[in-house]
Image: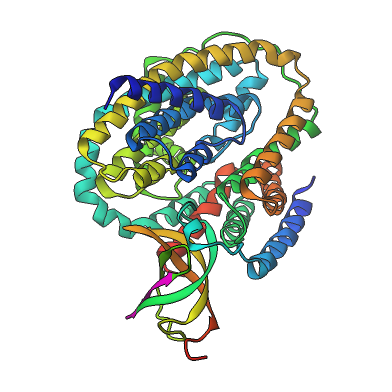
Amino acid sequence: MKTNVAIIFSLIFLFILFLLSKFLEPKLISIEETKKKSYGEWVKIRGYVKLKKTYNFTLVKVCDNTDCIFAFSKTPITNFNLDDYVEIIGKINKYKEKLISIEEVRILKLKNG
Amino acid sequence: MDSFLVFLSIFSGIIAGTITGILPGIHINLVASFLLALQFGDPILISCFIASMAITHTFLDFIPSVFLGAPEDDSNALSVLPGHRLLMKGYGYGAIKLTLFGSFFGLVLALLITPFYILFLKFCFPIIKYSVPFIILSISLFMIVKEKKKIIAFLVFVLSGIFGLLTFQIKPLSNPLLPLFTSLFGLPLLYLSIKNKTRIRKQKIVDLKLSKKEKIRPLLSGLFSSIIVSLYPAVGPGQAAILGSEIFGKLNTKEFLVLIGSINTIVMLLSFVMAYQTGKTRTGSASAIKEIVENFDFNFLILLLISCFIAGIFSFFICKFLSRIIAKKIEKINYSLLCFFVIFFVVFINIFVSGIFSLLILVTGFFIGIIANVSGIRKIHMMGCLVIPTVFYFLNF
């Protein structure tokens, strides 16, 4: 195989990877199951917001019927409030205990909605 | 703690490390993450198991990288070429013995410098962590400037970087490092071995003699390089080895193998010391231990270091024994068929561990790896797959 051919195929497959990175989502799991995940793994959870602190970052505690977990975003997130039902996609991380580094938050049901 | 159980854990770790070391595609991080997921057993015993498995793995994993050209991660990816070159000349066993020499004396050196390393981390680590993105980028650019085909080297570095960034963003993918390294460093070489109808000649069971200078220089260079690797994430042993050889003088093939062997083991041992002193983990094994042990104190560190030393002594003899057997048999094996089998095996392991999307990662990385292999540049530029994501992470992109 020649270098030029390998370069062209690399670019094609990188483009496919780019598309997949935009559209693929991790499997929905319970909060209890996130505790068994390794650091750096992607997770998707759903739960009620039970605590929310927003400064120049956001820290939330999300609970479902199995357990609770903290989720953290480096940037402030203001579009949801306490007791909203949310879906969070993020990576398992650690700060004293396991938490989720938030990539995306979707509001599924507002407290007063 | 019953010392019998501690020894049992250490010896179980040695057996597990031997298996993960000689089987291509099975990484210790995989076993460690299984243990974490199962959440059973005494944390101290599990830690001794993981530490001894990790050290044994660093001794044994040169067997597949030299005999099959199938590296498992960045730690031994760079040994593939010089080791393979010696294999083609009939000195595969001698090549393994050189890495063994490096691993064992690297382990001893690392144990000796541990008190100084702890002091060094105590005073210097807070400053060092701010320099991470600039240092790792500078090292990578330095490697590119040293290359004859600078444009291709730069292209491979950038493509690998984009590849790394995208791989870490594929959300259903577990253990992304496995397909990342298999595809860039393993599959292209296996493919080229099949394509070129590589035949392995009869192996000579002889030691490759080293002069006193050839023994000391790579070990000192290895120690220096390992400290760099332990401090800077995304700087692989290969990059540090080349950096070390620039400082300590150009190393020949034999010295390079001693160097790579020593770095592999020293980095693993120092990662436990780093976890104790700073709480930061640079290897999957240190990360797993830190996760399961609540009180990572000095006594516990000593226990881990003793486990590593015992594992090192046994691994030396196990590796010597196994490489001798493999070297005697390998010429009788249909090498192309073996490479086919290894490809199927590592692809299966990747799908099993990382999921079906790892196939796409394998194909993409394979083509980037082919560019580096066919154009004859150093494979080190493919470490862009870790360097660029790390720089992005530290600069908050």
Vertical order, A2 against B299 (above or below)? below
Residue depicted at x 72% and y 63%: A16
Q: Position of residue B245 (x, y in %)?
A: 43, 35
- Quadrant of the image occupied by residue A25: bottom right
Magenta span dominant secondary structure: strand
Vertical order, A36 against B193 (above or below)? below
- Quadrant of the image occupied by residue B129: bottom left
Residue at the front extreme of this rendering:
A65
Q: Position of residue B256 (x, y in %)?
A: 48, 28
Q: Position of residue B172 (x, y in %)?
A: 62, 59
Query: Going by the image, does B125 lie left or right of B248?
Result: left
Figure quadrant of the N terminus of chain B:
top left
Viewer can see residue A56: no
Vertical order, A12 against B143 (above or below)? below
Task: Please state the extent of the stretch shown in magenta in the rendering.
Answer: A53-62
Residue depicted at x 48% and y 91%: A112
Magenta run includes residue A57: yes
Residue depicted at x 65% and y 10%: B328
Residue depicted at x 58% and y 28%: B82
| Frontmost residue, B367 versus B305 | B305
Vertical order, B249 against B293 (above or below)? above
- Quadrant of the image occupied by residue A76: bottom left
Magenta run includes residue A102: no
Q: Tally the numbered discs.
A: 0
Viewer can see residue B388: yes
| Frontmost residue, B216 versus B173 | B173
Q: Position of residue B108 (x, y in %)?
A: 32, 23
